Image (cartoon, coloured by chain):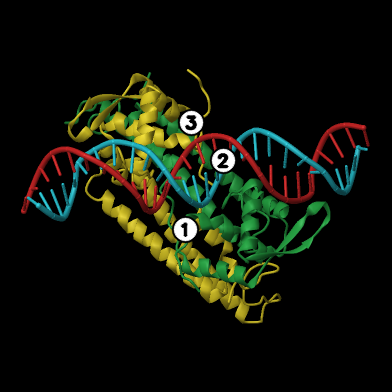
Chain colours: A yellow, B green, C cyan, D red
DNA sequence: GGAAACATGTAATGGGTTACATGATTAA
DNA sequence: TTAATCATGTAACCCATTACATGTTTCC
């Protein structure tokens, strides 16, 4: 009943409980495969992280070894305690978007480049977002009903679409700024690097 | 000249080089403050991470101690090597969005809840996204020109807006699905938990 | 018999968070 | 003088990645 707040590191545990709850009993190997497929764009984990975590979860009574198959295969089942933990996390924990994004960092630092380099960077990012969007749209194609990955997939697709739009608009904005800077008609004129004060070109 | 690929863990270093390049010489304390303010929504780091990293960067010749002020204050300056490293990362490294999002995980697991609980979860998420959007819009307000945080801030705002829309549409979708499930007019009828096969309610 | 896939682990390393610890300067 | 802020560091712990390591079953 302890309503202690959940730390970030709880998520692997939750993801495993979620898979066991949604798809029934499974081995560590099965769960690893599911991380590679259905959960690939949601939460990533390798077998070297999963096996020890399953052992800890069993020790904590959230799951049990239901059966042992051939090749030492251990089949885990979620317990009532496990279901409770999962339910509590879903209803009681509000996650916040992680403030650590390499993409946002590159966006932030873009003004350190001169215009042509910045444009190249944004074009590269845009191509990447488009590739991701295509990949997710391909996943969406056949199955529309099922439900399990649906909301998360929809979120991912919207995210990719938004990123493409952002890149497109930023490229246009940058081109426009560069055009304005060329003609000395306006009152204030800036040097090559298109940033604010103290802007310096990074690098050789 | 080594074009080795950059690992994720490079980002703290890059963020520090970026700040030193954009805003000129600064102490570890100054940089820590900047992480709390301008970089807060882009890349997070505390002083206990920053001080050792600065020492390593100095050892690697990317920065130097320009001066030592009162209270043992050390002022770091970026070197030519540092600028080169930063430039190489901006022009040569393409980051990918991290496949580890608590928000996406909750979205993925939503079908494990019954309709009313799922609705409550989505409403809670929506309120959170709206709060974040308001926060970022407030940051945008006064300064529109400067450039340094501009692209990253725009990206953040679009992201928050997209998330609000996703939540709104998912709520509508869920309500519609629930309405359809109530009336037994359609061919297939599902139980409470609105998911695919083997759906079970998590919890007590 | 040998390769591929099944199946499970451990160890080393690195990044990140929290907590611990210390001292100098400034303003009330 | 004493509290707040400035300023820098270290230690313990947790999570995640990569690499190491081992054994089984199935299929050709």
For mark 1, give the secondary structure.
loop
The picture quadrant where one finds residue B31 is bottom right
- The residue lying toward the viewer, choosing from B184 and A61, is A61
Q: Are marks 3 and 1 in contact (CB under 8 Å)?
A: no
Q: Quadrant of residue B191?
A: top left
Q: Which residue is mark 1?
A: B7
| Residue positioned 75% across, 57% down in the render | B74
Write down the chain letter for disc 1.
Answer: B
Secondary structure of residue under mark 3: loop
Q: Position of residue A169 (x, y in %)?
A: 49, 64
- Asked if marks 3 and 1 fall on the same chain, the answer is no
Single out the mark in the foreground, 3 or 1.
1
Residue B125 vs A120, above or below: the answer is: above
Quadrant assignment for the C terminus of chain A: bottom right
C-alpha gap between disc 2 and disc 1 = 33 Å
Q: Marks 1 and 2: in contact by CB < 8 Å? A: no
Distance CA(mark 2)–CA(mark 3): 16 Å
Of the image marks 2 and 1, the number of the one nearer the N terminus: 1
Instruction: Provide the residue designation for mark 2.
Output: B131
């Amino acid at each position: 009943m302890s309503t202690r707040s959940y730390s970030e590191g709880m998520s692997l545990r939750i993801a495993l409980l979620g898979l066991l709850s949604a798809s029934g009993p499974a081995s560590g190997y099965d769960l690893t495969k599911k991380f590679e497929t259905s959960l690939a764009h949601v939460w990533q984990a390798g077998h070297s992280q999963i096996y020890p975590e399953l052992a800890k979860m069993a020790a904590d009574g959230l799951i049990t070894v239901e059966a042992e198959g051939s090749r030492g295969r251990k089949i885990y089942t979620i317990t009532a305690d496990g279901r409770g933990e999962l339910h509590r996390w879903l209803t009681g924990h509000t996650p916040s978007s992680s403030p650590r994004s390499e993409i946002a960092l590159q966006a932030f630092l873009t003004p350190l480049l001169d215009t042509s380099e910045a444009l190249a960077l944004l074009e590269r990012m845009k191509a990447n977002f488009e590739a991701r969007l295509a990949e997710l749209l391909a996943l969406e194609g056949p199955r529309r009903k099922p439900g399990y990955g649906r909301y998360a997939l929809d979120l991912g697709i919207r995210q990719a679409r938004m990123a493409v739009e952002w890149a497109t608009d930023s490229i246009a904005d940058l081109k426009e700024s560069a055009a304005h800077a060329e003609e000395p008609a306006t009152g204030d004129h800036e040097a090559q690097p298109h940033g604010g004060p103290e802007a310096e070109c990074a690098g050789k």
